[in-house]
Image (tube, rainbow, N blue to C red):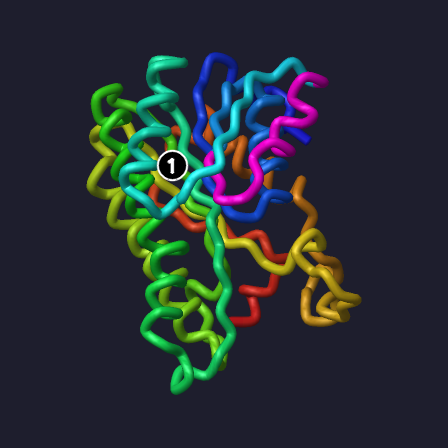
Amino acid sequence: MVSQGVSLKGEVAIVVGNQNFRVKSLALALAEAGAKVAIATPEDAKQLVEGAGRIGAEIYAQTIDITSPEEINNLVEQTMAQWHKVDILVNGANLMLIKPLSEVSQAEWRQVMDVNLTSAFLWCQAVGRQMLKQKRGKIINIISGLSQRGLANGVAYCASQGGVQQMTTALALEWAREGIRVNAIGVGWFAEAIQLESRLERYIPLRRLGMEDDLTSLVVYLASEASEFITGSSFFIDGGVMAHA
């Protein structure tokens, strides 16, 4: 559901992610608000454009390696060639690894860092170059509450999330005078991501799992002109879980 009065008409967005249920909901929400959207995913991209015609949206999706500098630059160039600018970047890649640190291989560590942290760096850099020329832009990095909270057997994942959050705050300072806003959204336990019967609700102060609308409404807001005075911030959509910390 798009917040009333918030419009992205005429804006161009790139949405990056490796979980198609979330990438699709983010892309459709941005498109519903009026943006043209390019999607980058390592998964099957065809299903992601379903529903675009229903709302008259301009969306295209490509299956690419979201950690490859060459493929990232190619998609940014294609987006520029088609729509001549990039106003919004949403980094939503997420790879979880739950394993005792003593058993984590260097290959596993690198994979988690590549997908969660290095990918966000490469997309911010590639899209940021265009935003710097435009003197405007909105970057939204989707992270986890584990960017601030520890988790036993989750050292690699927590480190990658903390890295993205720190990159967000540092980049917000670096590009503040260039007209670019950089923020992060920390996502808690969401119904779409919980595959099995779960009793996680008892640990959530609001006593329910998150829904994709909870996330997409904030993404649309942070991508819009309504959030012009917000940068370097992290917002946690978790039903109050972070309040326990």
Tell me where residue 229 appears, x and y as whole percent: 37, 33
In the displayed structure, 97 sits above or below 130; it is below
Q: Looking at the image, which residue is at 25% across and 39% down?
A: 125
Of the 4 image quadrants, the one containing the N terminus is top right
How many residues crowd around disc 1 within 10 Å: few (fewer than 14), some, or many (20 or more)? Answer: many
Q: Is residue 243 left or right of residue 180?
A: right
Q: Horizontal placement of 131 versus 146: left or right? A: left
Residue 47 is inside the magenta segment: yes
- In the displayed image of the protein, which residue is found farthest to the bottom? 102
Nearer-the-camera pick, 137 or 17: 17
Which image quarter: residue 2?
A: top right
Q: Image height check: is 11 above or below 20?
A: above
The residue depicted at 65 percent of the width and 22 percent of the height is 52
The kind of residue tagged 1 is: Ile
Q: Quadrant of residue 205?
A: bottom right
In-front residue for pair 46/92: 46
Res 14 quadrant in image: top left
Residue lying furthest right: 197
Does 223 lie within the magenta span? no
Q: Position of residue 40 (x, y in %)?
A: 46, 36
Q: Is residue 33 left or right of residue 75?
A: right
The residue shown at (23%, 36%) is: 175
* Residue on which the image places disc 1: 139
The residue segment tinted magenta is: 40-54
Q: Secondary structure at mark 1?
A: strand
Residue displayed at 33% across by 48% down: 168
